[in-house]
Image (cartoon, rainbow, N blue to C red):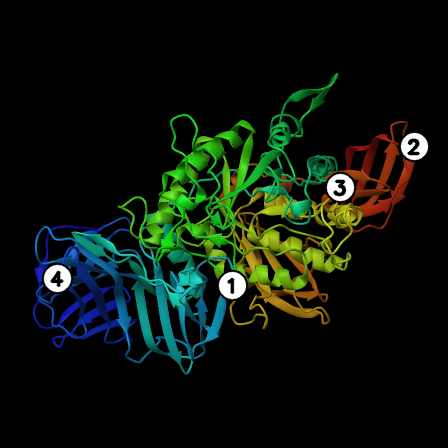
Amino acid sequence: MALTAGTVSLMAETKLEQGRWSIVNADDNTLTISFDGKEAIKNAYAEVTYRIAGTDVSGSISSASVSPSSVTIVPFEDEIGSGRALTRVYDDGRASMTHTLSLYDKAPYMIARVVVASDNEGEVIESNHMVAFATETRCQLPEGTSHRMIKVPFDNDGHGRYEVYDFSNEMTSHEVGCVFDATTKFGFVAGSVDHDKWKSGITIKGSYKRFIEKLELLSGYTSQLTRDYDWNTKTVIPHGYVKGAKAESARYMIGFFDDWRVGLETFAETCATITPPALWDGGNPMGWSTWGVMMNHVNTPAVKETAQWIKDNLFDLGFHDKNDQTVISLDSFCDGWGMTSSEISQLGNRFLSDGTYKEGLQTKQGLNMRLGLYGGMVIWDWTFGSQVSGTGIRDIPSYTWGDALLRYNGKEHHLFEGGQYCAIDPTHPAFYYNMDYTLSRWAAWKIKYIKMDFINAGICEGDSWYNPEITTGVMAYNYGMKIIYELAKKYDMYIVESMAPLFPYQWAHGRRSCCDRFSELGESEYVMNAMTWGWWTDRLYAVNDPDQLVLHKDGHNKGETEGENRVRVTTGMCTGAFIIGDSFSDKCVYTDDNGHAKGAVVAYPEASKARALKMFGNADINAYVRENTGSFRPVDGSSYTGSQQAAYVYMRDTPQYVYVAVFNFNKYIARNGSVLYESIGIEPSNVKEIKELWTGETVNGKTESFDYSVPAGDVRVFRLAKVVAGVDDIVVDRTARPSVSAVIAGNECVVSSSAEMASVALYDLSGRCVARVDDINHVQAVFDVNVQKGVYIVNALMADGSRLSAKITAR
């Protein structure tokens, strides 16, 4: 923060006012924050602990127990904007603590920070515990009497999730916390907007659903959930020390908002203003991953057959990204396990390329797909003695993975008890050499999509780091992820994080909002937990990722209903990325006899193909994913499931449409209700048409709302066309024109359209009608055919009387 000249010292009571805010430092040193004329936070204070490097001197300073040496109001300007700050300075004879509360001319929140410095010039001061803002005095929130609070997870590992508590408990949220009133939507949001050095804990204690009993914004928070836990001694590993001529806490945004959702979005947007996210203009990835079903049984023929099937059967139904490409993501157990390096190179440079290639005497056309591979920032405990790839060559020293371990108390640190992966020191040269070697090889193989897994192993605290300038886990993480990001940028690669902390965020284009979720209804509910309370992370990452979308999970005996499939696919639509996980090849066979017969076909390729044609052949759903980025927002936070705390109704506003998704996670009972236009931000007069995208039905709206009825274990997606579209619609919208596409797979023909169809006929090139289906009244038709290989013409009579045609090939 750059402070400008013009400091004014004030005696006795000091008051700073701006907009709806008032900060008063009374003559007895008590600090009160008021909002809209009501006292919201009383007896606020800051505190730090410190030590002077190279000496035995240590201490702590708290503004609650020491009188300030000065209280001033200072004009300032920083990345966020300009304003005035109330600054209080405290000194204990060895060090001084400066507590700053800033109000902006235009931003609707307050920023808090605390700084500690030695009183003696030239000394280095260190701190690993800095409370930028706190209170332990009961105070009532300005509005509402039925508050709840949101706990944000540190990472997406260990099957953790967002949690919601009644405001009669105490919790510590990671980096940001939120309290909201379920009835009025009024909310309180507090969170760190700097993520360069510190892990932050936001501790909130409430009572009687309306009183704040305790609030603490701490730089230096570690716990078992930040993966800073020593399983040998069963103790929390302390945070590393931030040091220098002065030590600064993170800055914390503190805000009251009429709508808690706006508060969390504002928090994310403020973070992005200070540290811009990674740029990506390629839209949502759409494609396929080996990890959904093939997993460790993957092989090259199965991957090629699956990729070919997707190209032949789903591409013409609109399943491709905005650049007319799909991703083929080779996950764990591919490189050097189920597939050789040569095979992967052949995939990228030939089979999936956008050009032609020779295979024997034949010239073939590549599939124009993007190949993906799997990496990480982690050390596995069976590799300590193994040489690090990329070291010991040319003039590069030889290192083992054991050399790059991050240690605590001199020992390797396992992130989970009994787990096999250990913390890594990303500043060790072995890590850079390995990443440089690995990504340069991948670039030669035409890899354009990389999944980085277990990278939370790079953010742990430890004894020390190879680079002495790095003194905390977050600093080390930023160091390591910058290496990955800059190499990926050099080779034009998309980065998606898997097991990863939510913050820092600027080193990846996408992040799994949750991990290892496949096909079942409860798994989809878990995915939507992350969108209910964490949709706002789409301001930090270009793409939120719901993990691979599986229709028939291996070992589940094809038990998933079509409704269950629609729910899972819609979680992808609501989140961002659209990556299929099923196997479409009978060439993928079990490589072991662990719970199945070795050599038998993995999962259910034929059943998955049939379902995929229906689920990933919906032109309207595919068009939304292809043409939009960003996540759906919960319509409210008052109603959510008991098991995973996922809301039922979500919305997304685009220039031409408002989309509303209504989920029913109950397997036995239908869900009926209505959606008020006001709740989704559209005027009733601006609703031109409502279409349900899974059934293709037109919905008749009411004056102020529209009704829905969702069968048990199913979902409905409503698209509300606007009478007056946004200014962005001045450009041509390819999805607005009616279109039809079709595929023939085996003995089944699937025809999809962006508008309702009345009937469909299939003709051979002689003009003979070989199949026909009437009374469709839907956007999709699936019917049996018995045809030879060759080219056919689909002719669709649309509900409005127009006709559309498409050419298809039966293979």
> Given the image, on which type of amino acid does mark 4 rest?
Ala
Q: Which of the marked residues, 4 or 1, is nearer the chain's N terminus?
A: 4
Judge the density around disc 4: few (<14), some (14-19), many (≥20) Cα neighbours within 10 Å. Answer: many
Q: Which of the marked residues, 3 or 2, is nearer the chain's N terminus?
A: 3
The circle on residue 95 is 4
Judge the density around disc 1: few (<14), some (14-19), many (≥20) Cα neighbours within 10 Å. Answer: many
At which x and y percent is residue 371? 59, 35
> Given the image, on which type of amino acid does mark 2 rest?
Arg
**Helix, strand or loop under label 3:** loop
* Residue extending farthest bottom: 208
Q: Name the residue beneath numbered marker 2.
A: 768
> Gap between marks 2 and 1, in whole Å?
57 Å
| Residue plotted at (45% across, 78% down) | 146
430 or 392, which is in the foreground?
392
Circles 3, 2 touching at the beta carbon (< 8 Å) = no
Circles 2, 4 touching at the beta carbon (< 8 Å) = no
Location of residue 781 with respect to 446 vertically, above or below: below
Q: Which of the marked residues, 3 or 4, is nearer the chain's N terminus?
A: 4
Quarter occupied by residue 75:
bottom left
Q: Which of the marked residues, 3 or 1, is nearer the chain's N terminus?
A: 1
Whether residue 683 is visible to the viewer of this picture, yes or no, is yes
Q: Name the residue beneath numbered marker 3.
A: 585
Q: Name the residue beneath numbered marker 1.
A: 161
656 or 439, which is in the foreground?
439
Q: Which of the image's four quarters has the C terminus?
A: top right
At which x and y percent is residue 229? 41, 63
Judge the density around disc 3: few (<14), some (14-19), many (≥20) Cα neighbours within 10 Å. Answer: many
The circle on residue 607 is none
